[in-house]
Amino acid sequence: MRYRENWIGFQTIVLKELSRILRIWMQTLLPPAITMTLYFIIFGNLIGRRIGLIDGFEYMQYIAPGLIMMSVITNSYGNVVSSFFGAKFGKYLEEMLVSPLPNWLIIIGHMAGGMARGLMVGIAVTIIALFFTDLQLHSLPVTLSVALLTSAVFSLAGMINAIFAKKFDDIAIVPTFILTPLTYLGGVFYSINMLPEFWQGVSRANPILYMVNAFRQGILGVSDIGLGTAYAIILVFLVVLFTTALMLMRKGVGIRE
Amino acid sequence: MKALSLTGLEKVYANGVRALDGINLEVDEGDFFALLGPNGAGKTTAIGIITSLVNKTAGRVEIFGHDIDRELEVAKSMIGVVPQEINFNQFEKVFNIVVNQAGYYGIARAEACRRAEKYLRQLELWEKRDQISRSLSGGMKRRLMIARALVHEPRLLILDEPTAGVDIEIRRSMWDFVRGINEAGTTIILTTHYLEEAENLCRNIAIIDQGQIIEHNRMDRLLRKLHKEVVLLNLRSPIAVAPELDGYLCRLVDEEILEVEITGQRGISSLFAQLSSRDIVVQSMRNKSNRLEELFMGLVENRAGRQQAAAEDKS
């Protein structure tokens, strides 16, 4: 296919994904908004008042970037894993597989769909956060680039999960037993400087820590991790996950007999 | 030019099942080609490989001269496929399913909408365009898959049991439609269990069994191989005993229906002459079973018989 055809194919996948996100907004957009409102009320407002300042910020302000990033991560992942597995399970993934869409374009199209949902939810959660606390914007380029790259990473992770999944249980296991614990332990609610040295070291093995802190750097200007290290880690994950997804698609693992 | 060329195509599944055992097959451009075989013979696997839904183990596939190993995207752009199973998003609107498919083939949205309207109208689905596809009847779902397969105007259309579970009226209207598509220049490969369908529509035929092509011929030449035909004659007046006719084997089904076996060498003129000389008047006549069906069963059963005999010899 030539550039024009590829561009139309990409647009078609993204528009299809956007239409799905908006069509089932009560499943895709509303629940994270409600969950995050509860986080702000309980952790930020009720408990946070007793915690005091972290890195010079009120607790509510400190956790807001982490909560935004948490919703970006879970929704980017959730969108691609459910959409791609749904297409595979319902066999309508074949519509794309028989077409001349190259594998990389199918991956990028779904990744863009996941990013779109992650960012839509991220914006909604940011607006909700503004009802509870004041947020400054330390660096727009850092904030935007970290949000975009992180949502891309987790969209790809969701796609790989969907490629391997054989039943609906398989798409719930990773978010429940891996993604959620890693997110909670990824510095959303605390600074790793508050942890004993050993656990600080353990925390540094968690990639989500780098994403949350880089995003916090973009909004508040404070971070437990150097920005360069964070970008490097995110980019390495992006490249590794994209290459893995492409290899799996080429081999037809889980999608071609 | 060959629309499809399969050379030494093999498929061995992970569980060790050899679904295709080195098949060679060629389909001419513009042909209406029947690919027949019993369940599990390898038809759907072959179609899966051609449409790249199944990875081949060995062999070569060319679509209008484009090798799928070297020019997969070009080859894919020339194929439209209507699969056996419903494979569209059942929660999507009819119109969107067709338009999105066009988008996957790189057709701009305005043109995609125009073509979607054209094919949905031709397949009598235009009134249903805003309905969620799940609400369509079985026949409509089949027609939707045909519209979707045609929206990028492929040169080769593969119909994998397109009329399964469809009532006879819709089946016949689908026959007329695909015949028209073929006459307009699209090469069609049809798999079906309705052998009457293959006999009516197709000019060339291949029969596949246990992963091997056991017959590949022109439909008329193949039918000529049929050594005998069994017809049922509806008689105007009842008779008590089946007549003894020279060169024909007769049996009374009931007192007004006579079953006659006609061998390849005998015509039917002599049959009617002999019946007439015995004052037996024939009201109407029909084949006991479809001619292709008899031939198909003969080929498949002969092969199974030969294999069993070979196995017994070995033991």
Image: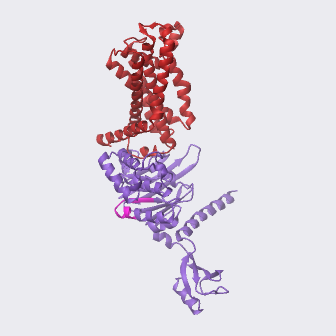
Chain colours: A red, B purple
Query: Is residue B185 part of the magenta span, yes or no?
Result: yes
Q: Would you place residue A7 above or below residue A217 in this image?
A: below
From this viewpoint, is residue A206 visible?
no
Name the residue nearer the viewer: B290 or B137: B137
Residue at 50% across, 65% down: B168
Q: Quadrant of residue A249?
A: top left
Is residue A166 toward the left or the right of residue A139 in the image?
A: right
Query: Where residue B77 appears, x then y in whole percent?
Result: 36, 49
Q: Which residues are magenta?
A: B179-189
Give the position of the C terminus of chain B as an image quadrant: bottom right
Name the residue nearer the viewer: A118 or A255: A118
Name the residue nearer the viewer: B297 or A101: A101
Query: Where residue B269 appears, x then y in whole percent?
Result: 51, 86
From this viewpoint, is residue B233 visible?
yes
Residue at 65% across, 60% down: B308
Query: Where residue B97 appears, x then y in whole percent?
Result: 41, 48
Give the position of the N terminus of chain B as an image quadrant: bottom left
